[in-house]
Image (cartoon, grey):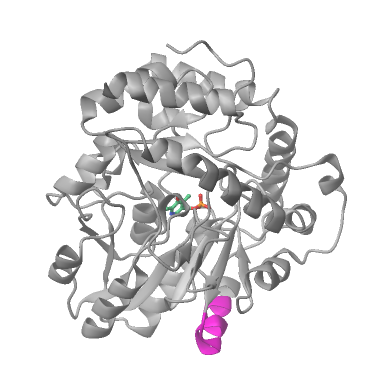
Amino acid sequence: MLPRRQHELPPTAGLPLRLSDLRPGAPTLAADIAAQLGTPPLQLECSGTACLLIALITLSELQPARRRVVAPAFTCPLVAIAVHQAGLELQLCDLRPDHYDMDPAALRAVCDEHTLAIIPTHLAGRVADVEDALAVARLVGAYVIEDAAQALGARHHGVSVGMGGDVSFFSLAAGKGLSIYEGGLLLAREPALRKQLAHTSARIVPRSVIRECQRSIELLGYAALYRPGGLQLAYGRPLRRALRRGDPVTAVGDDFPLTIPLHRVGRWRQAVGTHAATRLPDFDVQRGVLAQRRLPRLRGIDGVRVMQDPADARGAWPFFLLLLPDPQRRDAALTELWSSGHGVSRLFIHALPDYAYLGGLVPTPDVPHARDFASRSLTISNSPWMNDADFEAICGVLETVLR
Ligand SMILES: *Cc1c(COP(=O)(O)O)cnc(C)c1O
């Protein structure tokens, strides 16, 4: 194994909080982010998954005869849990070979007059093929929900991701860029649909003092420990413990509860996000510059395929998403790098049908490309705390493994 780094690096480049962010202030987080992104008004919810759930319930009331939701077979397990909680039926679409996007032919094969919504997913900050999802949605009369949980700040054709679909959402969870520990922003282009989404939320989302207290304490912990000296305690130790147990699903935090909590986000957490958000545009530029500087080195390693954006897109860069030539060499690289504190990890451990704990919630179609992607991919943090020597050490390991 690569010698353990003294200070643990986070697997994604989150915006670190400052002590001054914790002061009270105006709860204008949603409005401030909308202004930064240049989107219509955003609706703040308690998580990205809560946004998806509210979107699904709203759309299914508009089209009650349509009960099926199509998502990529390699995505966050929370997507499957939200579809289940909305009382809808998940249909998985296989990926394009060697790519995070849904396969166009597979997408056309699963969509029909029963399809309520298609969920193109901007994985790892990379910009997804929303146009193809829109084309299929138009053919069958379905909606498009853009999953931009990992892509706050990503742009396509000069506008924020999320503006192509009918509905979209961003995540403010720990480790996804700007964080209030748990939160989500819901976006709809059409004013009428925005009104309906707000209406659903007002109907089904209660206030909960207990939940908000819990999240506020978690946010304090996050603010205290999301720094070079604190991540070993908050991230590194639990990770290594789970890996020693042979439990990679827990190691990357893929083990979600099967019920999605719904509650209002309180004023204080909104204020914290509002303060931190003033630094977000600069942080995004910094991450982009760092990524563009490091991409050529990664791409130059024989056998490494780095996920990139389509032309006309400028994605967000929380981390790099890589494919290696085969599972053996991917695993060999992880043996060196996963536990060493260098911010190397995996995105999701399995294709959705392969999580034992999701059995019953998820169909089990044959999705060979999604399984292949899960078995050959790894991620490298784009944290500004990763210095050039760290990055070079990681590249060195990849070169050795791939030689
Ligand atoms: C994290 C994530 C979600 C859910 O967002 P939360 O804010 O964690 O509820 C949905 N989709 C993808 C692709 C994600 O990575």
196 and 135: which one is in front? 135
Is any part of residue 66 visible from this angle? Answer: no
251 displayed left or right of 221: left
Q: How many marks?
A: 0
Name the quadrant of the C terminus.
top left
Residue 56 sits above or below residue 153 on the image: below
Instruction: Say which quarter of the image contains residue 234.
Output: top right
User: Is residue 200 or residue 172 the one in the foreground?
Assistant: 172
Image side of residue 382 versus residue 335, left or right = right
Observer-nearest residue: 154 or 118?
154
> On screen, 111 above or below 300?
below
Asked whether, in this view, residue 100 is left or right of residue 338, the answer is: left
The answer to whether any part of residue 78 appears in the image is yes
Residue 84's image quarter?
bottom left
Q: What residue is drawn where x is 57% and y is 42%? A: 175
User: Is the N terminus in the top left, top right, bottom left or bottom right quadrant?
Assistant: top left
- Residue 321 part of the magenta segment: no
The range drawn in magenta is 189-200
Q: In this view, does 134 lie above or below 205?
A: below
Considering every residue shown, the one lying at the far bottom of the view is 192
Q: How far across and down, in percent of the image, does residue 201 sit? A: 56, 71
Query: Could you tell me residue 340's position as x and y percent?
Result: 49, 17
Residue 235: x %, y % from top left: 57, 27
Q: Position of residue 122 (x, y in %)?
A: 42, 58
Depicted 396 relative to depicted 320: above or below? above
Which residue is at a point 27% across and 46% down the rendered structure image?
352
Magenta span: chief secondary structure:
helix
